[in-house]
Amino acid sequence: MTSIFVTGTDTGVGKTGISVALIELLQQQGFTVAGMKPIASGCEKTIDGLRNGDAVQLMQQANIGLPYELINPYAFEPAIAPHIAAKQAGIEIDLKVIQQHYQQIQQQVDAVVVEGAGGWLVPLNQHQTMADLAVILDLPVILVVGIRLGCINHALLTVKAIESTGLKLQGWIANHPEASEQTKEIVATLKLHITAPCLGNIPVLSAKERAVNYLVDL
């Protein structure tokens, strides 16, 4: 079993919910799985330090207990772009540090679901982006597409950017953050233009529904 890197067409497209569902899907197949949120903005101050809600969700779904700092090595309080938050904090995001944390996690589990922040080309420092992190970790990529106006362009551009790195696009997932009359046509168009398989078509979920029920096996 290989680990995977989850990216999105933008922020707020449902990467965390999909990442949690992917962890659950792999667990159903008998694997020990951990989640990782290497970089997170919008963290809250707690008695234990800064904590990010997305990272906490990944930890709660994992079937192995790991220290928070291992899961989320770079945590920032302002809900702003990571490189700006890091600059305000007086630090520089070092991808080698993230790689070391990932390797420590990977040695203890069958698979790691790594959730990126924002979109594929979000800057992390003066010279590197989220894409560089995926390349350093050398992971196949799953793209979460938030199905809404403008997503076709965003999705196809992101697919080309992923493919240009040489990483494998494992597949993409259509996630519906809100109801729309054009969703079927949008998804059909994406299936026509994206060679990688559609791994799931997640509708607007009710309180009792789980995204994992709409994913196909990896």
Image (spheres, helix red, strand yellow):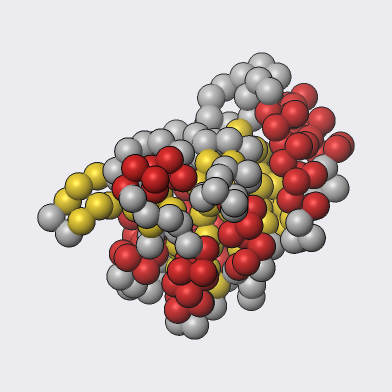
Residue 216 in the image, given as x and y percentages of width and height = 67, 55
- 200 to the left or right of 115: right
Of 185 and 72, which appears nearest the observer?
A: 72
Q: Quadrant of the N terminus?
A: bottom right
Quadrant position of residue 85: top left
Which residue is the extreme one toward the top?
181
Of 216 and 160, which appears nearest the observer?
A: 160
Whether residue 48 is visible to the viewer of this picture, yes or no, is yes
Of 132 and 48, which appears nearest the observer?
A: 132
Which residue is the extreme one toward the bottom?
107
Whether residue 213 is visible to the viewer of this picture, yes or no, is no
Q: Count how many numbered circles sit on residues in the image.
A: 0
Q: Residue at x 60, y 68 (%)?
A: 137
| Residue 91 to residue 175: above or below | below
Of 121 and 7, which appears nearest the observer?
A: 121
Residue 149 in the image, given as x and y percentages of width and height = 66, 20
Residue 156 in the image, given as x and y percentages of width and height = 77, 37
Quadrant position of residue 2: bottom right
Q: Residue at x 54, y 48 (%)?
A: 126
Q: Residue at x 85, y 48 (%)?
A: 195
| Residue 141 to residue 14: above or below | below
Q: Residue at x 45, y 79 (%)?
A: 104
Residue 208 in the image, given as x and y percentages of width and height = 41, 41
Q: Quadrant of the C terminus?
A: bottom right
| Residue 52 to residue 146: above or below | below
